Image (cartoon, rainbow, N blue to C red):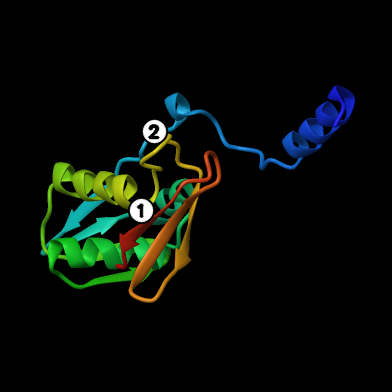
Amino acid sequence: MSDEDYEKLLDRAFSQLPTLSASKEDFVIPRADMLIQGSKTIIRNLYPIADKARRKPEDIARYISKELSVPVSIDEQRMTISGRFTQDELDAKIHKYFEIYVICKECHKPDTHLESADRGMYIVCEACGARYWVKGY
């Protein structure tokens, strides 16, 4: 194979790589915009958090429900949590969700998606191609 053929193949391979979002330095894990009403805590920005994670709001709600061991419900783009929780507690749970299910453990970028497996999920990184198993939620 000549150098020219190799360059053409290399150019073709690079042209087929996916376009990626901003670098890790520009990515900030969102904070919960929360409100406490009586014995319930409401997260008003569930959908923007889910958009940033590129995940379904129901998946994030299910994770938070299991982590806090309380029922949650989603209505009018808000998540209502049974119980009173502090801003720090909710932000820690959201941060943990991003660390486990969104951010790649190899290249530390948020450009990932989930694929179903028999007893869990695979996180597939669109930036570096890493693929690893995580426990389903």
Q: Nearer the viewer, residue 110 or 76?
A: 110
Instruction: Identify the residue at image location x=45%, y=37%.
Output: 109
Q: Earlier in the sequence, mark 2 or mark 1?
A: 2
Instruction: Identify the residue at image location x=14%, y=62%.
Output: 68
Q: Nearer the viewer, residue 24 or 135?
A: 135
Residue 52 in the image: state x and y as whole percent. 46, 46
Report the label total. 2
Could you tell whether 134 is left or right of 56 in the image?
Answer: left
Q: Which residue is mark 1?
A: 101
Q: Nearer the viewer, residue 3 or 38?
A: 3
Q: Secondary structure at mark 2?
A: loop
Amino acid type of disc 1?
A: Tyr
**Does the rendering let one see residue 20?**
yes
Q: Which residue is mark 2?
A: 28
The image quadrant where one finds the N terminus is top right
The image quadrant where one finds the C terminus is bottom left
Q: Nearer the viewer, residue 41 or 108?
A: 108
Camera-near label (2 vs 1) is 1
Instruction: Identify the residue at image location x=81%, y=35%.
Output: 9
Kindly indicate the quadrant of the structure image that contains residue 41: bottom left
Amino acid type of disc 2?
A: Val
Residue 18 in the image: state x and y as whole percent. 66, 42
